[in-house]
Image (cartoon, grey):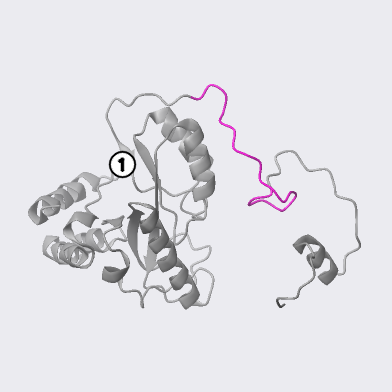
């Protein structure tokens, strides 16, 4: 490959390299979109909202800031468009898409959310401390850092950090963030949540108690700044969720977050 390559479409180059005969283009199967399914078409069709879908007013103002799509394999179950549609039905104030170590679904998400009137937040859940690729593992190793972009500059710096980590890992499914200077990269354009059970603060709370969790929380504040760290609470029906949330809320108040 060089700068003097012929004006040859990728499809034709792939056909020649595969030694396949030229054939007329087949009719596209119903539902083929060409974006993430097999490449029946080179162009993904524009998003069209379901008929009659309206964003209803919320009884209690709420924005979901930690959500995975099916681009986070074995974690999220719904497509980005479906998430935007459900957010509209529920009347959410906003929805953040935070897939693992990438922005895979944000274009689909942004298009759908714009069509159904849902404000968007873009972020990612970063996988820290991986020792091997985690492709296809239902409960991957490592800790998590949940980052939301405040603005386009934050989005760009987060994308650059993820790209650098993916390149440093040298294997698909094994990003390495060890060489990233977080305090220099974020520059007050990120919001960092303490995250799920694999976040440093909740993990320390469960394994070692409130004092250890406070040390981890102080470390996040020291790295990202007091105005950029938010303590995350979640309730998924586990009997211990309320006790953990009470403890996290006390930590947030004590830390002035």
Instruction: Name the residue rendered at 47%, 40% in the picture.
Output: 83
Percent position (x, y) of residue 216? 19, 66
Q: Is residue 150 left or right of residue 37?
A: left
Is residue 193 in the magenta section? no
* Viewer-side residue, 49 vs 146: 49
Residue pictured at 78% horizontal, 61% vertical: 11
Q: Is residue 173 left or right of residue 180?
A: right
Outermost left residue: 254
Q: Regarding mark 1 in the picture, which secondary structure is present there?
A: loop
In this view, the residue in front, 7 or 193, is 7
Total labels: the figure holds 1
Q: 200 or 187, which lies in front?
A: 187
Image quarter of residue 220: bottom left
Q: Name the residue under label 1.
A: 237
Question: Range of the magenta residues?
Answer: 34-53
Q: Would you say 226 lies left or right of 185 here?
A: left
């Amino acid at each position: 490959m060089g700068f003097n390559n012929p004006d040859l479409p990728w499809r034709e180059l792939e056909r020649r390299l595969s030694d396949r005969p030229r054939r007329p283009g087949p009719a596209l199967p119903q539902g083929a979109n060409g974006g993430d399914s097999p490449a029946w078409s080179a162009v993904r069709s524009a998003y069209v909202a379901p008929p009659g879908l309206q964003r209803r007013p919320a009884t209690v103002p709420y924005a979901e800031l930690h959500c995975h799509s099916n681009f986070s394999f074995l974690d999220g179950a719904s497509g980005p468009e479906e998430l935007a549609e459900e957010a509209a039905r529920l009347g959410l104030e906003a929805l953040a898409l935070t897939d693992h170590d990438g922005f895979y679904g944000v274009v689909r998400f942004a298009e759908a959310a714009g069509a159904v009137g849902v404000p968007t937040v873009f972020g990612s859940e970063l996988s820290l401390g991986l020792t091997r690729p985690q492709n296809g593992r239902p409960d991957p190793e490592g800790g998590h850092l949940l980052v939301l972009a405040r603005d386009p500059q934050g989005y760009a710096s987060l994308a650059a950090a993820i790209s650098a980590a993916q390149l440093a890992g040298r294997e698909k499914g094994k990003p390495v963030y060890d060489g990233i200077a977080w305090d220099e990269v974020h520059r007050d354009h990120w919001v960092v949540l303490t995250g799920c059970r694999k976040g440093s603060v909740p993990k320390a709370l469960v394994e070692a108690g409130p004092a250890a969790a406070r040390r981890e929380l102080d470390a996040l504040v020291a790295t990202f700044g007091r105005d950029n760290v938010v303590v995350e609470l979640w309730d998924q029906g586990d009997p211990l969720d309320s006790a953990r949330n009470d403890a996290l809320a006390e930590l947030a108040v004590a830390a002035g977050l």
